[in-house]
Image: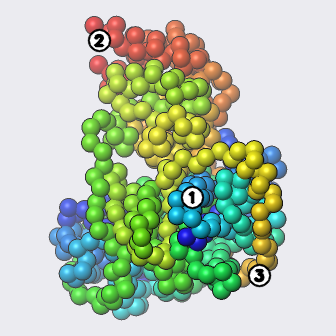
Amino acid sequence: MKVLVCVKRVPMTGGRIVLTEDEQAIETKHLGFAVSPHEECGVEEAVRLVEQHGGESVVLTLGPAEAEEQLRDAMAIGSDRGLHLVTDGEEWDPEATAGAILAAIRTDEAASGPFDLIFFGNESADSGGYQVGLRVAHALGRPCATGLKGVVVAGTTVRCEQEVGGGRDVYELPLPAVVTVLEGLNLPRYPSVPGRMRAGKKPLDLSSPERPASRLERSRLVVPAGESKQAEVLGRGPEAAPAVVDLLQQIGVAS
Amino acid sequence: MTALVLIEHVDGAPTDVSLQALTLARSLGDDVHALLIGPGGSEAAESIPATVTHVAEHDALDAFAPDAWASIVCELAARIAATAVVAPGSEHATDVMARAAVRLGEPLAANCTAVTPGNPITLTRIRWGGSLLEEARLHTGRALLTVAPHAVAPADPGSPGAVEPFVPELADADLVVRVRDRVAPPAGGVSLADAKVVITGGRGVGSAEGFAPVEELAGLLGGAVGCSRAVTMAGWRPHTEQVGQTGNKIAPEIYVACGVSGATQHIAGCKGAKRILAINTDPEAPIMSVADYAVIGDLHEVLPAISAELRRRGA
C-alpha cells in the first residue's frame, strides 16, 4: 500500500492563550510545538497499515521551515519519507491549504503511483476548519468519510467507523479513498532512540507553494472574556472531606 | 438576503443545535428557508419557524449519505437563490457543509458564534475548541457557515411557514459514501455524556493503578470516570474517557478535576459543567482560575477521605 498522512504543526498552548500585540496570532515565544492530535493518530495508523500490508507511508505538511520537526517526529515512529510545502509562517486558509496539498499529491502520484489511502485529521487543533480533507478528496474524485475512530483496510475497501452521538456509523469505501480521523483511533507509539536516529536520514522533499488571497479573511483573534474565577477553597487535605460532601449533598448529587 | 438552513432531526423533531443555527441565520435577514432531509423530515418540518420549509424525500435517503445531502443543499440553494447557507456544527452537518462548499466553490466558515450581514459579512468563529475566538470577514456572495453548538439560543418556535416536499435529483456517485451499519454505544454503566457527576483524574494520579480512588468515588456517587489527555497518552485509561478538545465535551452538574493542571485543551471539554471542583496540590494551577471550588491537597489522600465521609453519612 501507498499511504499519505497530512499533518499540521500547532503550538502546545498549555494553561492560558496569550496573543501577539497585533492580535493576529498566538504568542508562541515560550511554547513548544507538536503534530495536531488527530493527525498524530493518522501517522500511527498509516505506519501500522504499512507494517501489516507492506508498501510505503508518506507524511506531508504545509508549514514554516520549523515544521520539519513534526515531519521528523512522524518519521521517527515509522513514516518512510516526507513532503514539506514550506511557507513563510503566515496562516493559510482551508481552500488555499487544500489547493497546495492537492498539487503536491498530483506531483507525487505522477512520479510514484497513486496513494491507496490518504489520512487527514478531522479538524486542526488551532484553526478548526473541518474541511481540508474533503476538499482534497473532492478534487481527486475519491470517496471520503470523516470523523473516524476506526479504519480497517480489507482487500479493495476500507471500513470506516464515524463517531456520532455515542454510537458509530459505519461506511465502506472503495480504495483509493480519503479519510479524516479523530484522536482515539489508536494510541500512538513513542519514538525509540534508533527511530529518531533513522528519521534524520529519511528523504524529505521540499517545495514552496504561493499563498493565494483568502476569502475568509481574519480580522483579529480574541481571547474570550475570562470567567476568571476565584475558587472557593473548601479546605486543605483530607480534612476538607466533610465540606466536599456538604457541597455534594447541597447540589443533590449525594444522599 | 435569503438564507437556507439545514435542519437535522431525530425522531420527528428538529435537534436543538439546528434551531440554534436557525437563530444565527435570522441575524442575516428575515427570509429564512429551512431544509430537512430523509425519513421523519416531513413530521419534523411542521414546527419549523421559516418562510418555507423544504423537505427532500427520496428512496435513497433512508441511510445518511453525505454527498447526497450536499447535492441536495446545492440544488435547493440554487433554486431559491440563497445568499447564505447555514447548518449546525454537528458531525454530520459539518461534513455535509464542507462537501457543499467545495461543490459550490465557496469558502466555509466553521463554528460561528455570531454573524453580521454586509459586504463582506463579518463573523465570529471559535478556534481551539472555544479557547480562542476569531473575528473574520467573509468575501463572497454566498456565505456558507456552520454554527458552534450551544453558542446561541435556539429559535423561538414562532409560526411555521409553508412545508414544501420535493424529490431531489441524485446521482449514483452521490450514494457511494453512505452509512451501511450502526454500532450502538456500549451498554451498561453511566456514560460520560449523561453523568451528573464526573470524577476526572489527570497526570497527578500518577499511574493506571492510581485511579482506584477516582473509580471508588465515581461509583459511590453514581457518576462517571473521566481523564485528561496526558493520562490517555500515557496509556493509563482509554480515550473514550478523555475529556477535552479532542475528547468528550460534557456538561455535568459537578465536575471534580483531580490532579488536572487545566490546560486549555482540557478546559475546552469541561467548561460546560455547572460547577467545577478542583483537587490539586498546586493552588496556582491554571485549573484554579476556572474552578468554583477547590481543595488544596493530594488527591490520593483527599479522595479516600471523601469516600469515607460519604459512607459514614450513608450508614
The residue pinned by badge 2 equals B314
Crowd band around label 2 with a 10 angstrom C-alpha radius: few (<14), some (14–19), many (20+): few
Q: Residue at x 52, y 10 (%)?
A: A238
How far apart in space, not on screen, are marks 3 and 2 (Cα)? 68 Å
Q: Residue at x 49, y 77 (%)?
A: A176
Q: Is residue B207 left or right of residue A246?
A: right
The residue pinned by badge 1 equals A51
Q: Is residue B194 left or right of residue A176?
A: left
Q: Residue at x 72, y 67 (%)?
A: A82
How far apart in space, not on screen, are marks 1 and 3 (Cα)? 35 Å
1 and 2 marks on the same chain: no
- Disc 1 + disc 3, Cβ < 8 Å: no
Task: Look at label 1 and name its amino acid.
Answer: Glu
The subunit letter for the residue under badge 3 reads A
Q: Position of residue A249 (x, y in %)?
A: 35, 20
Whether residue B311 can be seen here: yes
Which marked residue is nearer to the observer: mark 1 or mark 2?
1
The subunit letter for the residue under badge 1 reads A
Residue A24 numbered mark, or none = none
Which marked residue is nearer to the observer: mark 3 or mark 2?
3
Which marked residue is nearer to the observer: mark 1 or mark 3?
1
Quarter holding residue B52: bottom left
Residue A210 numbered mark, or none = 3
3 and 2 marks on the same chain: no
Is disc 3 placed on a helix, strand or loop? loop
Is disc 1 placed on a helix, strand or loop? helix
Closer to us: A112 or B173: A112
Q: Position of residue B208 (x, y in %)?
A: 52, 28
Task: Look at label 2 and name its amino acid.
Answer: Gly
Q: How is the image coloured?
A: rainbow
1 and 3 marks on the same chain: yes
